[in-house]
Image (spheres, rainbow, N blue to C red):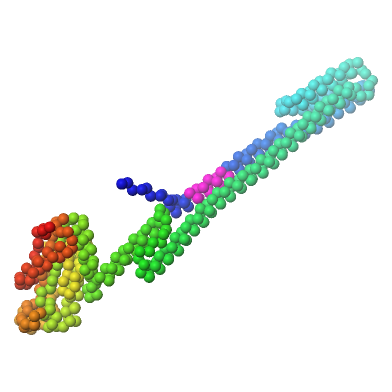
Amino acid sequence: MSDKPKNKRFTIVQKLTASYAAMLFFITASLVYSMVGLYSLNRTAKDIARSDLFAINTAGKLRELMLAQERFAGKYVILKSDEFLDLYGKRQGEFLTLLGEVGRRDNNGNFRAIVQAYERYRTEIERVFRIGGKDELPAKNEADAVVSAIDEFSASRRKLLADKLADADQREADTVRFSLILSFSGILLALTVAMLTVHTISTALRKLKKGMHRIAEGDFDYDPQIPRGDEIGSLSEDFIRMGKKLRELEQISLDASPLTRLPGNIAIERVLNKRLQTNEPFAVCYADLDNFKAFNDRYGYIKASEVIKLTAELIHETVKEVAGGNAFVGHVGGDDFVMVVASDMASPVCKEVIARFDTFIRKHYSKEDLAKGAIEGVDRYGISRTFPIMTISIAVVVSGGGDYRSAVDVAKTAADIKDLLKKSPGSTYLINRRQTPR
């Protein structure tokens, strides 16, 4: 059966990065939109200055030049003075020059109407000059037609200019409005994501704080109910694992010997069952102090307890030095200890423990007892006996993977080996490699 895919959630860093990226995108879009708008307005302004304002100003000058031509033409016809004819010619030249400039920039219908009206005026005035008419206002109608055409041209350009300015004002307003909308949209989006992220973090921290209080009260199974997927979710998972580990440590602590602080029977059984489940080879070394009761009777409970404590330290330090950090040392109770090591480390560990114990234990007997090599005492049946200096016996059970079904099977085999060891004098160890019958 395939596992269901987990819901993927964005991490806090990804959320904040996305929010600021969105804000940067909107602000950049706003800047680009503003620059495009400003460029368009600048083009419109240049077009107005180059075309519309020029046309309107030139139309005014054309009107003045047309009226000046009309006046000088009338004075020449009446007074016949060449001075007025020259002035008329100059104004005509200026008029044609400006008219040509307008034509190069704006050759539309209104411009052509001016040209056509002026051609009719010039034709008529030249005819008047040839025949020498006495009319005070020669070619009056044609001149009026030219002025009217110029006025219509100016009016059309003014209307076009007004339309362009109105359009420019509208585009300016649109540019400002949409630039602000884009900018505030990015900022609002970033603030929204940031506020949601802060709310998520603060909520999760409150839940974690509550969980810490619950753990402090002993509720190691408490789940803060924080969604998984981001950094806070990962922290919540670590929090839950921490609670489970604290519960295990509490059980081990409650099970540990108050004298030696070594793990007790519950921890020993858990370690053995875990090793058995992996089917990897390992060795279980059950250590027992021989003649400990006689020592306790002779030197008292306090001295005997000190020996138990120091023996626990000796075994623990020796196992860690020889077998490494993966080894385990437990205290079954009284003068019984358990060492769980790799199968190939059983013999070196036992030899070193025996060597150190035999040297260590002699420091706790009196000179007289050491000289005799024994102490007088009463056995468990109340019979007076002579007991040798304390020794240590180690029963070793090696599991080759699948040899034993439970910790109980291992303990039974070790008990049988210890019975054999009790018959041998001095500190010794015996390794059993036979499989337990099923």
User: Looking at the picture, does residue 35 appear above or below residue 232?
Assistant: above
Can the viewer see residue 58? no
Can the viewer see residue 199? yes
- Give the image quarter of residue 271: bottom left
- Give the image quarter of residue 213: bottom left
Magenta span dominant secondary structure: helix
Magenta segment boundaries in residue numbering: 18-31
Image point 68% across, 39% down: which residue? 168
Image point 41% across, 54% down: which residue? 230
Residue 388 pos. (x, y %)? 6, 77
Q: With 218 as the anchor, is 61 left or right in this view?
A: right
Between 6 and 314, the one nearer to me in the picture: 6
Q: With 326 as the anchor, is 63 left or right in this view?
A: right
- Give the image quarter of residue 42: top right
Between 262 and 22, the one nearer to me in the picture: 262
Between 227 and 382, the one nearer to me in the picture: 382
Q: With 46 as the anchor, is 332 left or right in this view?
A: left
